Amino acid sequence: MESELLNTLALSRIQFAANISFHILFPTITIGLGWLLFYFKLRFEISQHPVWMRIYRFWVKIFALTFAIGVVTGITMSFQFGTNWPGFMEKVGNIAGPLLGYEVMSAFFLEATFLGVMLFGIHRVPSKVHTLATLIVAIGTSLSAFWIIALNSWMHTPAGFVMENGVAMPTDWIAIIFNPSMPYRLGHMMLASFLTASFLIAGVSAYRILKGDLKSAPKLALKQSLPLAAFLIVVQIAVGDMHGINTLKYQPAKIAAMEAVWHTEQGAPLVLFAWPNEDTQRNDYEIAIPYGASLILTHELDGEIQGISSFGEDRPAVKPLFFGFRIMVGTGVLMLVVSWIGVWLLWRRDTLPQWMLKTLVGMTFSGWVATIAGWYVTEIGRQPWLVQGVLKTSDAVTNIASHNVALSLAMYLGVYIILMAAYLHTLFNLARKAVVVDEYETGNLTDVALADAVSKENRHV
Amino acid sequence: MFDDAQLPLVFLGLMGFSVLVYAILDGFDLGVGILLPMDNKQQRDRMVASIGPFWDANETWLVLAVGILLIAFPQAHSLILRELYIPAAFMLIGLIVRGVSFDFRVKAVTRFQRSWDWAFKLGSLFVALSQGYMLGRYVLGFDQQTIAYGFAVLSALGVAAAYTYIGGAWLVMKTAGPLQLRASIWTRRAGWVAAVGIALVSIANVSLSPTVAARWLTMPNAILLFPLPVLSGAIVVFVDYYLRNQPHAEDFGHSLPFFFIALLFSLSFIGLGYSYFPYVVPHVLLATEGASAPVSLRFILTGILIIMPTILLYTAFTYRVFWGKATDLTYH
């Protein structure tokens, strides 16, 4: 029985990780892309120039596809709590429930309902109403992120409640929603989403140009997205730093594991690379910058960093955090370098050389890599807790037979693999189809834009 | 507004309302999916176009219903999803597959498009069957006897037929010409299967459960409740009569079948609700047992009372925007 429960726990954790990892990829795109679509449509409203409509029309298709996968994989998430983690709702349901409820009511319905108007309603409502629908969908996706991040942050830094008979009772909803790590996490995630969307647009536009698309739409999309990425990555690095300092205050064990600081020390070095060794509690093959970690985290050379060994049993595994953090930061640095060189090249000669276009295609999904790595760091970093200091993951799991969990997990994984292949295939297929579409004609711009908007060749593309 | 003891019942009502709206709204788009004719691409395109702007929001009602169950009755949520772990997983897979097929069927390369249509059709059928199965397991309180499983299978077929029924009626309302005629035939067939299904499930329900029988078959309840089955039967007969005489001059009354079937769904739902109120899990758990803390329920209720009418308003707005016969879907 004991090992049966352990199997169920392990499989449930893998299943939850698989479901949420797959799910988050798609909202990460749509949260940022929704606002960018609103921006494109707004530019069209103001200028009436058909190129903006072209950009909008191409990206709204990708938005629709991405959104659909996000919705259906999100439904799975809403069942997960009951199917695999009954202990979560039993213990903290009085807090988690309303936050999830507000997400469904204030965000989910809003985005899903107005998505219909946004995707298919342009001939049925005035253009301004359509632009408004696009704005509402963008607001909806962001509100959704707001509530989910509020709940997730509360699980990291719980506040505004008391324990009564082993159950969390809310005392202050403002303190619950705006818990100590919430503003940092929300900012970090929103920026991650905009960066993911920017690099996606830049990558796919570069792909189209490489395939011989000489129209103005991909070129303009590239010129819009790359400077945005270059700006946001700088902001993101600053916000990430603040988020790290917040984590040091509330979850020092997570920071210790991220930096692979085994024993409490002042003036801890910044470990660039190492192979953390759980047995000997030290790092093998370490390359480090002296005082680096203390400087970054405490902004003092001899600041004290609490070591992993001082947390006893209640601390996360070191390797996934240490490497996950380095993958995230490494991707971020790559984003910084590529976007700044790209912007500089665009500024100097207005077009990008082949090698830069190819680099951007390679970076199309860099946002996904950084986002997933970052979430793994923060979520694994909370272990063994499900709700920091309140509920352990192992106490929340279902006692359902492990072979049932194995079956559902296998089904999900199978579907996800097919979906991911189909998504990537379709994305680049849409890009290739767009390459052969004719350029809009110039003339009376307003008429052209409208004619373009209803042009037959793009039906069902 | 409500005292603490009433709160769980208010949430039970809200959850029931969400389930009913879900069954009608996602019911019709699942039904359209089940009916997708693999022999006629043009008709398939038109059928999918008729549900295109709606299906996303329709599915959200399921999330709301499960959400209310999770928020207000966490104990019941755990209990139900533990018992229905495998069918729920099947339903979720079905929802994923059909939801994405909707987008892939037009955007994927041509040679895969037909496969996505199959995925859409079978995924829709899968979802309908698993929901019906889960409903059957649920109303008998997850009884472990063989006959209870048989009842669940019956319920699965009944729900799939009912979704097909309302889906067909949706097509009668939203299409014209040969497709409308074809949809009329589909709807009539599905109607008889659904009617037999509903009748059998009702009889089985009364005969398998003494408490339900007591509620329906004692005086004066039996007389007061009599209009419910009679009205339901009348709807089925009327819809069949209307569809048999298709096409009607100037498409007269083309939306009647849909709204009458929606009424039939509501009546069946009232019947179920009356049988089991105030249980949140029939025979097993009362709504008042294991509900969340009043302070949490009150916090979310405030939101629901403000937001729910807003949702209904803007849902009505989108249905109005896309009112009339479906046209080809264009992303502008």
Image (tube, grey):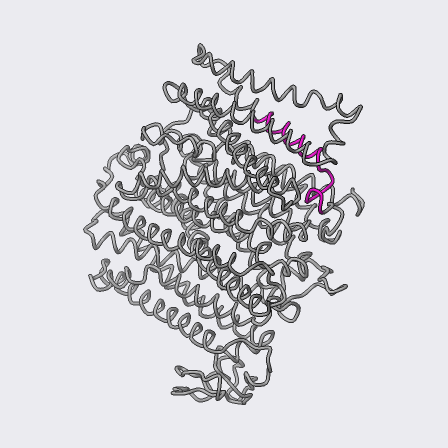
User: Relative to residue B221, is residue A181 depicted above or below?
Assistant: below
State left or right for residue A452 relative to residue A245. Answer: left
In terms of depth relative to the viewer, which is nearer, B5 or A267? B5
In terms of depth relative to the viewer, which is nearer, A257 or B224? B224
Count of numbered tags: 0
Question: Which quadrant of the view contains residue B223?
Answer: top right
The residue lying at 63 percent from left, 39 percent from top is: B308
In terms of depth relative to the viewer, which is nearer, B264 or A179? B264
User: Relative to residue A241, is residue A350 depicted above or below?
Assistant: above
In terms of depth relative to the viewer, which is nearer, B323 or B141? B141
From the top left corner, tell me how far across and down residue B42 is, in percent.
Answer: 32, 28
Q: Residue furthest front?
A: B146
From the top left corner, tell me how far across and down residue A423 is, in percent.
Answer: 35, 51
State left or right for residue A239 relative to residue B114. Answer: right
From the top left corner, tell me how far across and down residue B305 is, in percent.
Answer: 68, 41
State left or right for residue A295 relative to residue B224. Answer: left
User: Relative to residue B78, is residue B269 depicted above or below?
Assistant: above
Q: Residue furthest top?
A: B249
Is the N terminus of chain A in the top left, top right, bottom left or bottom right quadrant? bottom right
Based on the picture, tell me whether residue A318 belongs to the magenta stretch: no
Question: Which span of residues is magenta-colored?
Answer: B262-284
State left or right for residue A31 relative to residue A224. Answer: right
From the top left corner, tell me how far across and down residue A62 is, in percent.
Answer: 36, 47
Is the C terminus of chain A in the top left, top right, bottom left or bottom right quadrant? top left
Q: Main secondary structure of the magenta part?
A: helix
The residue lying at 33 percent from left, 70 percent from top is: A337
